[in-house]
Amino acid sequence: MKVMYQSTRSANAKVTASQAILKGLAEDGGLFVPDKIPALDVSLDAVAKMNYQEMAYEVMKLFFTDFTEDELKTCINRAYDSKFDTETIAPLVDKAGAYYLELFHGATIAFKDMALSILPHLLTTSAKKNQITNEIVILTATSGDTGKAALAGFADVEGTSIIVFYPKNGVSAIQERQMVTQKGSNTKVVGITGNFDDAQNGVKAMFNNKELARRMNEKGYQFSSANSINIGRLVPQVVYYVYAYTRLLGQGVIQKDEPVNFVVPTGNFGNILAAFYAKNMGIPVGKLICASNENKVLFDFFETGVYDRNREFILTSSPSMDILISSNLERLIYRIAGEDAQATADMMNALSGTGKYTLTPEMKAQLTDFVGGWASEDKTAVEIKRVYEESGYVMDTHTAVASAVYKDYREKTGDTTKTVIASTASPYKFGTSVMAAIDSKYKGMDDFALIDELCKVSGVKIPQAVEEIRSAPVLHDTVCETEDMQKTVESILGM
Ligand SMILES: *Cc1c(COP(=O)(O)O)cnc(C)c1O
């Protein structure tokens, strides 16, 4: 059955999957959503016997219905190959009472690789299918991990170029070094003086600027987005939840139909939304536990039904979750509004106007799948140390937020449902905070100084991605004011 995509903010014109991937964001500023979430059409027992690539095809073919089998399999095989340092792609590790789904075995050692290794292939295939001849300019705002993963994915991909904006003082030393050493003649990296939300707003404003789009088209360019609002990012993320569930089933850890909880360290709400889609495809899921750091706007939202971004922005040790506007939440809002685009648009307009919106009681009543939780900086550090001491397992700060939230949840509810924690980054990416949590003698040392220490403590081989940037030259040093983002883009494109 053909799945079409429409905006969360207006009920008109539906587009195909490839068109939605190309556009990124709908013209009215809404996000593309499938007109229905398809059900898996193979049994979970059968899926349990498939490898990651085979399973990826079973999931993606149901969403990307205008791709041929050959097109989709080519995209999948180009994405999930030896760029990953393990054949299983996303290993599930049983430690200290939970299953950690390691999503950081790709080129840039964070979970963004799971989707951004395939997006460039989906996008160039989509361009061909739609007779696009313009160069596709990927414009991305990053809180640290998306940027590098997108750069790595798009570098030297023909017919594309990529410009990444990141908050100059809001990413880790390793994250920044990863980005500014990026090779590829079609890549540009720009630091901005604002925070991640400023970067994201600046990018959204450019996407919504029709006059800019017209001038770009004259020059043979068009924008697309690699941010997690692109449906081409969201769908590949559904795959690993199906994978995690069926691995547990295959190993006999769970029985047929037994539910599993997923705990997801959350920022922009893309990763956990993918888990929600997996549930809607027929994966037995108990609770979706949404873990926040001290920027706990989502925790408050699930508690009260009020989304309120009017609060202090806090820089934490889990910078990829330092976000006050969780863009992908719009897709959930649309869903619990009964797919009412007008109601969704009204709430999103309130959010951009007053920074706030309130769910109706009927909408709030539909959030029973979700549990919100949050962990302070102290709690996060204590959790890193606890799990290390109990099991020898060293996790990164983002994963630790989720792990701490899960520990609380289990103690509070007594829920013993088997639980998978999305492990979103390698500890090597956030070594300063990870090592200081394990032993205060490491405090004050930077990520680079700690690489060898972390290797000794964790017994985990230093990833190639880290080895590479230790000595790589800095190739990007542009910094601009938030207000000047568009000017910077025009100058890069020679407009
Ligand atoms: C992006 C990111 C997150 C947050 O994921 P969302 O899909 O934005 O909610 C969590 N952890 C890490 C390491 C990330 O890079």
Image (cartoon, rainbow, N blue to C red):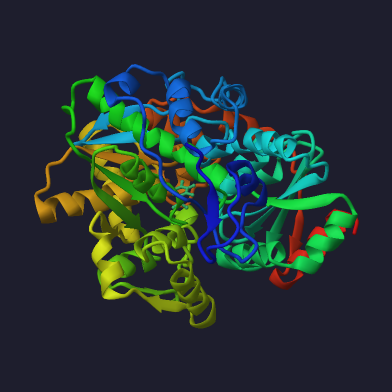
Give the answer, above or below, for where 253 lies relative to 370: above
Please report the residue visible at 74 percent of the width from the left and 43 percent of the height from the top. 474
Going by the picture, which residue comes out furthest to the left?
414
Farthest bottom residue? Answer: 354
Total marks in image = 0
**Quadrant in the rendering for residue 336:** bottom left
- Confirm whether residue 397 shows in the render: no
Residue 204 drawn at (x, y percent): 64, 64
Question: Which residue is nearer to you in this view: 311 or 283?
Answer: 283
Q: Nearer the viewer, residue 421 or 122?
A: 122
In the rendered structure, the answer to whether residue 139 lies left or right of residue 33 reads right
The reply to whether residue 187 is in sight is: yes
Q: Residue 137 in the image: state x and y as whole percent.
A: 75, 49
- Position of 377 with respect to 52 (left or right) is left
| Residue 41 shown left or right of residue 444 in the figure | left
| Residue at (30% x, 27% y) in the render | 246
Report the residue at 30% width, 41% height from top.
Answer: 421
Q: Please say if 232 is above or below 459.
A: below
Tell me: 490 left or right of 363: right
Residue drawn 43% across the image and 55% down it: 269
